[in-house]
Structure formats: structure tokens, C-alpha cells
Amino acid sequence: MAGAAPLAVAGCATVPGARSRPTPASAAVPRNIVHLVVDGMGSGMLSCGNHYSQVTRHRELSWIRLLNRPELVHGLMDVRSQNSLVTDSSASSSAWGAGVRIPNGMVNQTSSGRKLVTLYELLGAAGWQRGLVTTTEITHATPAGFAACNKSRNNAEEIAEDYLKRRVEVLMGGGRKYFEAGSRKDKLDLKQAYRGAGYAVIEKPGDLRSAPSDQPLLGLFNAGHLPFTVDVAGGITKGEDAPGLATMTRAALKRLGGAERFILQVEGGRVDHACHNNDAASAMREMIGFDEAIDVCLAYQAEHPDTLLVITTDHATGNPGLNGMGDNYGKSNELFRNLLSIRQSIPELVKRLLLTESVDQFNQVFQETTGYIPSTRRRELLDPFLKKKGYALYEVMASDNAAMGQVLANHVGVCFTGTGHTSDHVPILAIGPGAEAFRGFIDNTVVFDRYLAAAGVQFRNPQERLIAQQPTSAGSAGSGERVEEYGWV
């Protein structure tokens, strides 16, 4: 990127139908910004997560507690993409990361193929240090939306190279396979390239404690996404040792805290994956992990009051809800507590059930991992889905994971409306200097403007009209979210 060029004001036509973008006058300017994203959380997931927190931690989510703090600013955000009322993560994060609505499947690239200037390029040129922390692959859609440009969110190897070109100072999550010569299509040893550029590359959680504070940091803690918390905690699945989101967030803040100014994106990404799988128990555990990261950031803000925290989600997924169960809904509480007995994610449970050779073995595995044995009729209805031959009246539910989620809903009382994203407007919370800019009903593109204003940077990417249908060229280039990958640790 050319030196000071991006800091100039870019002229462009007003987009018809767009909301105005006034920047509120405020004397409060943050020195640091932490943008926390729980991927895939709608209001139902927030409610269930709060119920789960009360059952397991005997307290409300910190997200809920924040709503009672008088200095908190609470808003609602429209997160549609350019081509659909229902966004995917790459389009949603790119709206934050470039201030433009783009088609689903792309990363900071418009339907006409124009590459947009990203938030992290602009803030890097302005002297800010930058970080990305996630429980997904570090190259996944949400972190990529702040720093990368690509015609497809699925071009993870190229996105990994983009981070190095941008010299993003802190990168932590999964996705090691996109950095290793043995697993990259081009056989490039990208880990060595990062080392050559001065990065400390770490792969074990214990190494976070001794990570240097004077080098950029690349933390790769799994080949793919970090394992679901329920699988690790349940002791059944033996996954790679991986740090929790709170641990990574604490390490990122420690590393970035010495900078004059910094911005950090923190993503609890596997809530979305669990909701795609209709996996209530996994989603609840991931929500708690995200809430623990909020606590880390609130503690940091208490010591550094010039830090702005913005807490939100990019979209809702599956819209889970605790349903009324039993006479007068009297069984809802009891069934919800059965979530505590589930020790494995649905994808891992499905894999184990496929290895059973008898009804007795099937029931043993089911009870061992969930505390529940489905009735004979439910097992018979589930069996075709396990063999990839199931038929669902609502087509999006025609998967083994969704069918398993419906079976388990009889045990836990929580059921999903689908397996994809939904069009919900999403909550956004802000606390700290500059928080007032996030009050009310806003477009997600406004976040980009607010962050640049905090940095004293004036810039606007060229805007495009909303389109009723994604052009063929954009659709074939961008390609969609590969939800099937979320079923495997």
C-alpha cells in the first residue's frame, strides 16, 4: 500500500437508501480499541447462554451484566450483505473492515472485482499495532475481514500471505495447515517466511507465557479450527492441546499493550460452528469461553481506561431457543440442566455412533456421551440420516448433525430453526471512550467509520448499490461457506 495515500478522503457517490453516517462529536478518543465478536449469536443464543451461565457459574453472563452499567452504550445493527438480507461472516466482517457491503463469500472485494482498502492497512499506516485472535482458523472469514482482500473466503493460503504482507503484529488461532509447506498447495513454508520477517512463531499454549514482547507474534495452535471446548473438557476426544480464547486474549493484550495505540479483534468463532451443527451443548460451552474473554478485556480496560471495548456478533445462526416442555412448561428447567451431562460435540458423537455394530453398543455410546438413550422409534428415524439417506420436510435440516440435534432436543429442551444464518438485526455494546458513537440503530458499515475517526484517519472506500442477486462472476469467484468443515475437529 502506498504511504500516505490511503489517509486522504476518497470521494464517492451516496448510496441510495443508505443511512446517514454522521460522526458524533465527542472529546473522548480511545487510545486502544478491542472489537469482540461472538460469531453466530442471535438473541436466542444469548438467552440460552445466560441460562447456562447461571446453571454452571451461578451468575449471569458478563455480557448481560454490562447492560446494567450506566456508562454502557447499547445499539442494534443491520448486518445484511450486498446481495442478501442474510449475510455470511466474510461479508459482515468486511463491512466492519472496509465500510462497504459486499457479496457473501468475498473478503473486502466488491462484486465488480475492486479490492478495498482494509481497516488494518489504514490503521497500520497511521502507526497503530493490530491483532487478530480467534478460536477458528486464523485465516477464517471474520478475522480476514479486518486485514485481507480476496475474491473468496475459502482461499485461506492466500489470506495467510495477506497477513504477512500487512505485517499484522499479533495473530493467534488455528489453521496451521495453511502455513506449513507439507500441507499448502504451493509447498511454500510460510511459517519460515514469518520467522524471516521477524515473527515469533509459537504452537504450544505454554509458549504464550514466554512469548517475546518485542516481536510480532504468530500463534498456530491446531491444524484446523481449535477443538470444541466440550470435546476437550469431556475427556472423550483427544485433541491437540489448545489455549482458550481468554488465554489468547490475555496474551494478545500483553503483547500489544506496549504499543502507543492498538486495535485487536477477538472472535469466539465456534459458537457459529456449533449452531450450524444444531449442537446446543457445544454452543453453550463456546459462549462461556467468549464471556471469559470479555472478562479479560474488562479487567484490561479497568487498568487502561483509554481503551474502547465494542462487543457484538456478525450474524445469528440457527436461532436456538429453550422451548416450553411438559405440562405448563414445567419440564423446561429440568431438561435444560441435562446439557451438563453432554460430554461430546454432535459431530464427534456421530462419528462414534457410526462405528457401533449393535443396538446395545449404540445405546451405550449415546448414554456415555449424553446421559440419554433415545427411544427405539427415535433411533430408527435417526438411522437414515447417519447413513446420509435421511429425508427432512424442511430441506435445510436434512443432515446427520441436524437430525441428532433434534433427537437431543427431547433431552435438553433446546431446538434450532435451521442450520444456516438468519437475517436478525444484532446487538452491539460499547463501553469506554468513544462508545457513544455506537448508540441506536446503525448499519454495520458505520463501524469502519467510527474506528477511523478514533484514529484521526479520513478515508472512504467506493460504495456499490445493493443488488438483488449476486452476479454469476461474483458467485463463482466468492463461493460459499463450507459448513461441512465445522463437523470435524
Image (tube, grey):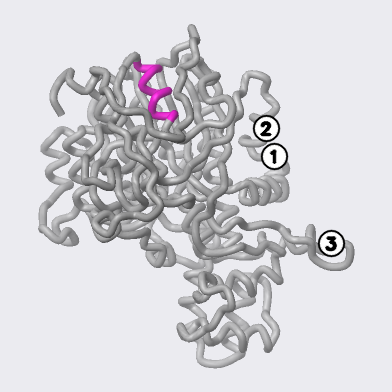
Q: Main secondary structure of the magenta part?
A: helix
Query: For this view, does 107 lie left or right of residue 197?
Result: right
**Residue farthest to the front?**
16
- Which residue is identified by label 2? 65
- Which residue is identified by label 3? 329
State yes or no: discs 1 and 2 in contact (Cβ < 8 Å).
yes
Q: Residue at x 41, y 48 (%)?
A: 89
Q: Position of residue 58 (x, y in %)?
A: 72, 43
Q: Residue at x 52, y 31 (%)?
A: 442
| Residue 372 belongs to the span the image colors magenta | no
> Which numbered disc flags the more N-terminal residue, 3 or 2?
2
Q: Residue at x 57, y 73 (%)?
A: 394
Q: Amino acid at mark 1?
A: Glu
Query: For this view, does 373 lie left or right of residue 85?
Result: right
Query: Magenta segment range?
Result: 446-455
| Residue 451 belongs to the span the image colors magenta | yes
Q: Position of residue 232 (x, y in %)?
A: 49, 59
- Which residue is identified by label 1? 60
How far is disc 1 from disc 2 in space, using C-alphas? 7 Å
Judge by depth and name the residue closer to the eye, 466 or 461. 466
Look at discs 3 and 2 and give the one toward the viewer.
3
State yes or no: discs 3 and 1 in contact (Cβ < 8 Å).
no
Identify the image quadrant of the N terminus: top left
The reply to whether residue 330 is visible in this rendering is yes
